[in-house]
Image (tube, rainbow, N blue to C red):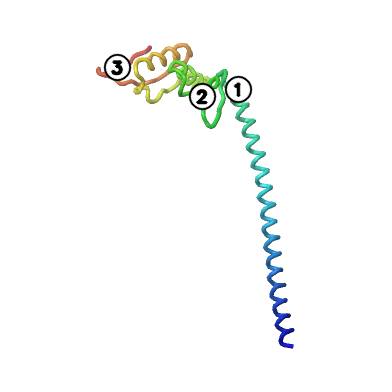
């Protein structure tokens, strides 16, 4: 008799453990389903962002522009590998988008331009038809020059 009571208690404990295990499995299955739905939505959002990025790149006034791994490429060449004149031309084209009807662009850190970079900037700026305000370091007293 005691043996049967012990077996019954053991069986009851296993059944209780089985119920808890089933409840845990059901909880995990519900959580997995929610995460899968979230993953599908995020994948859909990423595809939408890729499409938006492609459309925005196509609208840029810069032929051959693309983005790969977070880098701006022009005809497959990383922006920072282009010669300075080409970088200035592209930077000014991008600045035109921000300038819109105002036609005025403020250039920050132009004091870091060496003479070749400054010449490339001036050439691209002149061709753009916009007005620019840029500060440079000089060995002389302060003067304002229109160029």
Q: Which residue is mark 1?
A: 59
Q: Position of residue 21 (x, y in %)?
A: 68, 65
Which quadrant holds the N terminus?
bottom right
Which label's residue is closer to the chain start, 2 or 3?
A: 2
Residue 96 % position (x, y): 51, 20
**Residue at the (41%, 16%) spot, across then down:** 121
Q: Residue at x 71, y 68 (%)?
A: 19
Secondary element under disc 2, as helix, strand or loop, is helix
Whether residue 25 is situated above or below residue 63 in the rendered picture: below
Query: For this view, does 4 lie left or right of residue 38?
Result: right
Secondary structure of the residue carrying tag 3 is loop
Q: Nearer the viewer, mark 1 or mark 2?
A: 1
Residue under the image location 34 percent in, 15 percent down: 115
Tell me how far mark 1 sits from mark 2, CA to CA: 14 Å
Give me the disc on residue 98: 2
Q: Residue at x 48, y 14 (%)?
A: 128
Q: Are marks 2 and 3 in contact (CB under 8 Å)?
A: no
Task: Please tell me whether residue 93 is drawn above or below residue 70 in the rendered image.
Answer: above
User: In terms of depth relative to the viewer, which is nearer, 98 or 79?
Assistant: 79
Q: Position of residue 67 (x, y in %)?
A: 55, 27
What residue sits right under mark 3 in the picture? Answer: 143
């Amino acid at each position: 008799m005691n043996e049967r009571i012990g077996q019954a208690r053991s069986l009851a404990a296993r059944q209780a453990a089985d119920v808890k295990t089933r409840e845990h499995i059901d909880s995990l299955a519900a959580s997995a389903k929610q995460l899968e739905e979230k993953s599908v939505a995020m994948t859909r959002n990423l595809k939408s962002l890729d499409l938006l990025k492609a459309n925005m790149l196509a609208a840029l006034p810069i032929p051959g522009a693309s983005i790969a791994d977070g880098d701006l490429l022009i005809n497959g060449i990383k922006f920072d590998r282009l010669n300075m004149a080409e970088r200035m031309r592209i930077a000014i084209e991008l600045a035109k988008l921000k300038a819109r009807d105002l036609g005025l662009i403020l250039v920050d850190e132009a004091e870091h331009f060496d003479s070749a970079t400054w010449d490339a900037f001036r050439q691209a700026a002149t061709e753009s038809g916009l007005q620019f305000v840029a500060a440079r370091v000089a060995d002389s007293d302060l003067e304002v020059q229109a160029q």
